[in-house]
DNA sequence: CGACATCTTGATCTGGATCAAGCCAGGTGG
DNA sequence: CCACCTGGCTTGATCCAGATCAAGATGTCG
């Protein structure tokens, strides 16, 4: 089985054969979700975690008045709820944004990894720590950047993350998010998202048609976003 | 030494004598910072982590145009840069908001914990995962709540976190943040923070004088904030 | 074919930013 | 001991980025 998680971890440190086997062994079964389906309901107590093999998913929180915020977007190789291994109970939902194929990993198996594979444990821990780094980057973008810069930043981020798992061709990639979902990611209205995208298109920074994004000018886009990929920890170092 | 970290971890799961000793042994030395001092500079490569014993600190990111965003506020018992153990390099600064006493923990020692104490490892991992949960809560507040609700939420959060380490008396606690810092936390201007605070005072939800906050009406404050403490994981369960 | 989602555009409104002063307390230097 | 300065808080006036409301265009799917 081609495993995008291994691919992602290997981009950050080398895994031993032993560790790669341990990771493979931990996957008990796979499962599919349809687009729009709820993968995990808020406040559920979890005993297994979910690794995306294929597709896009999001962590979402909906307030009483119906306003929704997406706190992260996950792609192949991401453990959407690895943190639930330790939290046990999660205060947000996880939704499939597109059709998804996922691997199910019982917490018992993750616990076994922490008992027997210290280095692999650190690599999984690292994944959750990078999640947090992405959260911080979004906080900075929401709090202090203009909507255009925030959007530019998000596009740069998704480009690099998708590149690691081989889902980009040159400067082009599929990003199947509606403008309403983009609004929920950035804390904006869908109307404003539409205008921001027109602005970025107008400045010839990117194209965005039929769920396919093409970055026309990486330099200017990342300049506008003040994008620094450090937080994605994409260098291979011993951890 | 009274260790607020042990106090905090014990509120989430029981530690064995062995584990408590291992935690104590890991502290190589302590150090003090003055208010306003930079504890960690952005982009530094770190080989040790910093545990706050006493005082308030913040992770901050400053943009080119001088705008600043605070992405977390840390208090006694918090490892401000535990994530640096795995990230190695950090893309934000850490500033002492007040005078701080901290314990220094070499990464080598943390690595030894991951080799020898799986359960304690999970508890430290849990700390970083709760950090991320706080980030998500801030994202929701910044993206979708009114400034007043966001402020109310922040006050509720700080109250509970300070309560765990015994830094509250009844409904009153010291929160030594300027209105400018509050603005940097919530993505607002200090002028607006001032008006929001006046609003909350006017509604008799809280007092805030001389860096001391008194919650006058917890029910209404947490109602306004739609505050649900689940994300702080304050129940003692086996992890 | 109708129903529904998504995108687009225009008009208007508003929460919070920005700019500008004044106020107060504490600290410093002469 | 006073004059001054600095940092934080407060208030008022004005501005603007982005929200909200409304309607139409386009596409898709049962």
Image: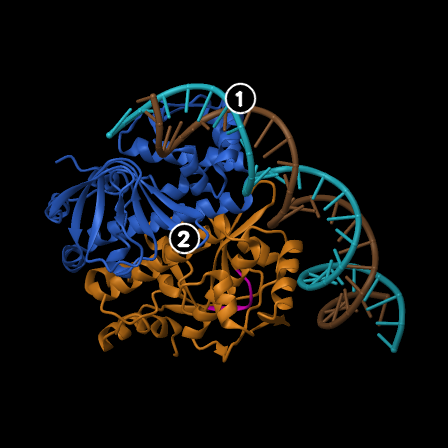
Chain colours: A blue, B orange, C brown, D cyan
- Eyeballing the image, is B142 above or below A33? below
State the SS at label 2.
Answer: helix
- Please say whether residue B53 is one of the residues in the magenta stretch: no
The x and y percentages for residue A115 are: 16, 60
Image point (64%, 54%), residue name: B192
Which image quadrant: the N terminus of chain A?
top left
At label 1, counting other C-alpha atoms closer than 10 Å, the crowd grade (few under 14, some 14-19, many 20 or more) is few
State the SS at label 1.
Answer: helix
- Eyeballing the image, is B3 above or below A137? below
Measure the alpha-carbon separation of dots 2 and 1. 33 Å
Q: Quadrant of residue A116?
A: bottom left
The x and y percentages for residue A209 are: 40, 22
The x and y percentages for residue B145 are: 51, 53
Report the chain holding disc 2.
Answer: B
At label 2, counting other C-alpha atoms closer than 10 Å, the crowd grade (few under 14, some 14-19, many 20 or more) is many
Segment colored magenta = B96-101
Question: According to the image, label 1 marks what residue?
Answer: A202
- Eyeballing the image, is A206 above or below D10? above
Residue A60 visible: yes
Report the chain holding disc 1.
Answer: A
B88 relative position to A50: left or right: right
Choose between A58 and B62: the one closer to the eye: A58
Image point (65%, 67%), residue name: B202
Question: According to the image, label 2 marks what residue?
Answer: B136
B59 relative position to B49: left or right: right
Residue B54 visible: no
- Eyeballing the image, is A193 above or below B126? above
Discs 2 and 1 lie in a common subunit: no
The x and y percentages for residue B16 are: 23, 75
Q: Tag on residue A61?
A: none
Q: Tell me if label 2 and label 1 are in contact, CB under 8 Å.
A: no
């Amino acid at each position: 089985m081609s495993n995008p998680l291994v691919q992602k971890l290997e981009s950050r440190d080398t895994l031993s054969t032993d560790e790669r086997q341990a990771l493979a062994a931990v996957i008990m079964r796979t499962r599919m979700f349809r687009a729009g389906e709820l993968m995990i309901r808020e406040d559920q107590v979890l005993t297994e975690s979910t690794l995306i093999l294929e597709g896009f998913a999001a962590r979402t929180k909906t307030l009483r008045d119906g306003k929704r915020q997406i706190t992260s977007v996950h792609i192949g190789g991401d453990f959407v709820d690895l943190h639930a291994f330790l939290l046990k109970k999660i205060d947000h939902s996880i939704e499939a944004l597109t059709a998804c194929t996922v691997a199910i990993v019982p917490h018992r198996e993750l616990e076994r990894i922490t008992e027997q594979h210290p280095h692999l444990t650190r690599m999984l821990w690292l994944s959750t720590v990078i999640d947090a780094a992405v959260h911080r980057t979004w906080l900075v973008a929401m709090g202090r950047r203009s909507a255009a810069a925030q959007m530019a930043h998000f596009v740069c981020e998704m480009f690099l993350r998708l590149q690691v798992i081989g889902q980009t061709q040159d400067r082009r990639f599929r990003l199947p998010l509606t403008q309403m979902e983009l609004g929920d990611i950035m804390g904006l209205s869908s109307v404003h998202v539409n205008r921001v995208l027109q602005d970025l298109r107008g400045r010839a920074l990117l194209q965005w048609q039929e769920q396919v994004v093409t970055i026309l000018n990486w330099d200017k886009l990342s300049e506008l976003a003040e994008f620094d990929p450090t937080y994605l920890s994409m260098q291979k170092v011993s951890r």
